[in-house]
């Protein structure tokens, strides 16, 4: 959408709208850069408190994905006061505030308007040393790709809306979405993380492609190594396919090659995620240290692929099927 707007061309701009990154980064001094991002959406779950927590974890994620620490946040909200009880708004804001408090992020207030559809999210400001900014543009041939959350929130949320999701699966989906990426970000400290992004609306393959394109590399994904949330496969088999999954699939189609990939997994790799995990391209000698640092913080980091020689901005997905 931004491609037709004039370029900004300010030397203070470290990461601007011209890249596929999650947030903008501006140099304030030799020691400090400002990271800014905004994210909001309509409810993905029925419980208002959970929705608030998920929206907050998702908004903070774009700051963590730049290698930065979130510092303060403003809530952005549209609320249909005629059709929903105010209690829903209160619970949602309380959920968001709970996450901000846990993460040590200062809530600065925000702005709510009347609107036809309930929409909530946050504008988040983060801080980082200018030399420590991580983008999706640094992946190098030989790097190992690590993913820090299982995928499937899109198909599971669709199954929930259709009333066909089991209680255990619902709980696991929500637990994944309310978890922030702070631990996965902190685990990066001192390691050779060459590129970092979070997996959200474009799905694993879409965000992988953005990294491949921004870095000028080809990436290879081992489909069976990608962790799936419980019930994700059954949701696809039962026809709970979000529109975003179909759109992602057609968007990546010309840039990927799949070999021996089971069709259900092929679809899940395009599933749009809400509050998904971090995808990191890590120097091979640091992968074990990263996994260990994640484990110590209660995060399961899965090795799902690597950066390979080949045409820039493409992906190859191997499924291991005959
Ligand atoms: Co993002
Ligand atoms: Co985002």
Image (cartoon, rainbow, N blue to C red):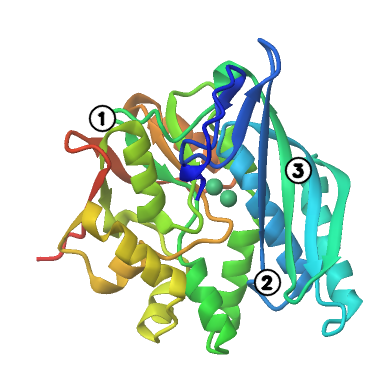
Q: Is residue 95 above or below residue 189?
A: below
Q: Residues within 10 Å of mark 1 (few under 14, many from 20)?
A: some
User: Is the CB of the residue bearing disc 1 within 8 angstroms of ligand 1?
Assistant: no
- The residues bearing labels 1 and 3 have C-alpha atoms spaced at a distance of 34 Å
Q: Residue at x 69, y 59 (%)?
A: 55
Q: Quadrant of residue 124?
A: top right
Q: Which mark is residue 103?
A: 3
Of pointers 3 and 2, the one earlier in the residue sequence? 2
Circle 2 residue = 43
Left or right: residue 82 versus residue 242 is right
Q: Nearer the viewer, mark 1 or mark 2?
A: 2
View extreme (bottom): residue: 163
Q: Nearer the viewer, mark 3 or mark 2?
A: 2
| Label 2 secondary element | loop
Circle 1 residue = 142
Disc 3 and disc 2 in contact, CB within 8 angstroms: no
x, y percent for residue 236: 38, 78
Q: Residues within 10 Å of mark 3 (few under 14, many from 20)?
A: some
Visible in this render: residue 303?
no
| The one of 215 and 104 positioned closer to us in this rendering | 215
Left or right: residue 10 versus residue 284 is right
Instruction: Give the total of numbered labels.
Output: 3
Q: Residue at x 89, y 68 (%)?
A: 90
x, y percent for residue 139: 35, 31
- The residues bearing labels 3 and 2 have C-alpha atoms spaced at a distance of 22 Å
Of pointers 1 and 2, the one earlier in the residue sequence? 2
Of pointers 1 and 3, the one earlier in the residue sequence? 3
Disc 1 and disc 3 in contact, CB within 8 angstroms: no
Q: Quadrant of residue 137?
A: top left
Visible in this render: residue 176?
yes
């Amino acid at each position: 959408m931004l491609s037709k707007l004039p370029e900004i061309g300010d030397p203070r701009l470290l990461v601007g709208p011209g890249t596929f990154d999650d947030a903008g980064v501006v140099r304030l001094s030799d020691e400090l850069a400002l990271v800014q991002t905004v994210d909001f959406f309509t409810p993905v779950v029925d419980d208002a408190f959970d929705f608030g927590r998920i929206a907050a974890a998702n908004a903070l994620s774009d700051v963590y994905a730049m290698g930065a620490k979130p510092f303060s946040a403003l809530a952005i909200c549209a609320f249909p006061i005629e059709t929903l009880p105010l209690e829903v708004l209160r619970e949602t804001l309380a959920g968001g505030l709970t996450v901000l408090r846990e993460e040590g992020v200062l809530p600065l207030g925000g702005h709510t308007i009347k609107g036809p559809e309930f929409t909530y999210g946050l504008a988040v400001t983060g801080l980082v040393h200018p030399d420590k900014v991580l983008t999706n543009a640094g992946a190098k041939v030989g790097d190992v790709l690590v993913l820090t959350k299982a995928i499937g929130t899109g198909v599971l949320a669709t199954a929930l809306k259709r009333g066909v999701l089991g209680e255990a699966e619902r709980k696991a989906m929500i637990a994944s979405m309310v978890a922030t990426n702070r631990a996965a970000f902190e685990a990066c400290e001192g390691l050779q993380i060459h590129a970092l992004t979070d997996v959200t609306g474009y799905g694993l393959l879409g965000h992988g492609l953005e990294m491949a394109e921004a870095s000028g590399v080809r990436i290879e994904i081992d489909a069976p190594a990608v962790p799936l949330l419980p019930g994700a496969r059954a949701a696809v088999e039962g026809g709970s396919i979000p529109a975003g999954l179909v759109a992602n699939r057609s968007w990546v189609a010309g840039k990927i090659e799949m070999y021996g990939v089971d069709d259900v997994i092929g679809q899940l790799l395009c599933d749009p995620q809400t509050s998904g995990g971090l995808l990191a391209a890590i120097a091979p000698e640091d992968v074990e240290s990263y996994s260990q640092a994640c484990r110590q913080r209660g995060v399961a980091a899965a090795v799902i692929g690597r950066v390979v020689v080949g045409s820039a901005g493409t992906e190859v997905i191997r499924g291991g099927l005959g």
